[in-house]
Image: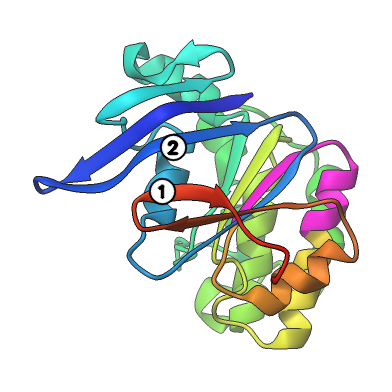
Amino acid sequence: MIELDNVAYSYGGAELFAGLDLTLAPGSFHFLTGPSGAGKTTLLKLCYGELIATGGQVRLFGQDARGLDRDSVAQIRRRIGVVHQDCQFLDHLPVAENIALPLTVAGHGSTSDDLRDLLGWVGLSKQAAQLPPELSGGERQRAALARAVIMSPEVILADEPTGNVDWEMSQRLLGLLVELNKMGKTVLIATHDLSLIRAAKAQVSARVLRLADRRLQLAGASL
């Protein structure tokens, strides 16, 4: 689905990482960890075509990312749901409309039942009419996850989805991501939270990758 072959990325004349090999197979579950500044967010952006590798090849659903035009990238992104670290919303629109925005932009209709079911799944039924500034941190993260999956993507990429919430909420978010994986979705979570990874490994078969010293490697069993 998403393949990185000997990928390198340089920024401002400095090499962030090189020699990266990664395959996100259908239905797989991955964690990406490593120190701040190692390039975890950059790696995620390569996986959904926001950035282009400066070396090697990135293939998105069999297509070389370097050769894709804007329309092709837009089509591919409909197959990839992204939960960004900063959870940006349109503050003048209710939560329900923010979640439905990807459908609106893509010109797809959505039944009220579909949206209602999704709001219920993430536990935001009562917050549907609220504006984003009225939400707690955990509610914003769940709204971001709902928005990422409303187009029924095949791959979910999450960048520090539990970084600003307490342990109880992080477990709730993890449970939703595990549920998506059990539905056949491919999941990649970038996180520095090793406790979250340990908790997940009791629920799902997860591959843990560590990005450090410009290289990507399988993390040790000590996690």
- Kindly identify the amino acid type of the residue bearing the numbered disc 2: Leu
Q: Residue at x 62, y 58 (%)?
A: 219
Classify mark 2: helix, strand or loop. Answer: strand
Residue 215's label in the rendered image is 1
Q: Would residue 82 be found to the left or right of residue 211 on screen?
A: right
Location of residue 215 with respect to 167 vertically, above or below: above
Q: Residues within 10 Å of mark 2 (few under 14, many from 20)?
A: many
Q: Nearer the viewer, residue 217 or 140?
A: 217
The image quarter containing residue 49 is: top left
The residue stretch that appears in magenta: 177-189
The quadrant of the rendering that contains the N terminus is top right
Magenta includes 222? no
Which mark is on residue 20?
2
Look at the image and say whether residue 184 sits in the magenta stretch: yes
**Residue 115 x, y percent position in the rendering:** 78, 49
- Depicted 223 relative to depicted 115: above or below: below
Instruction: Please indicate, yes or no, whether residue 123 appears anywhere in the rendered image.
Output: no
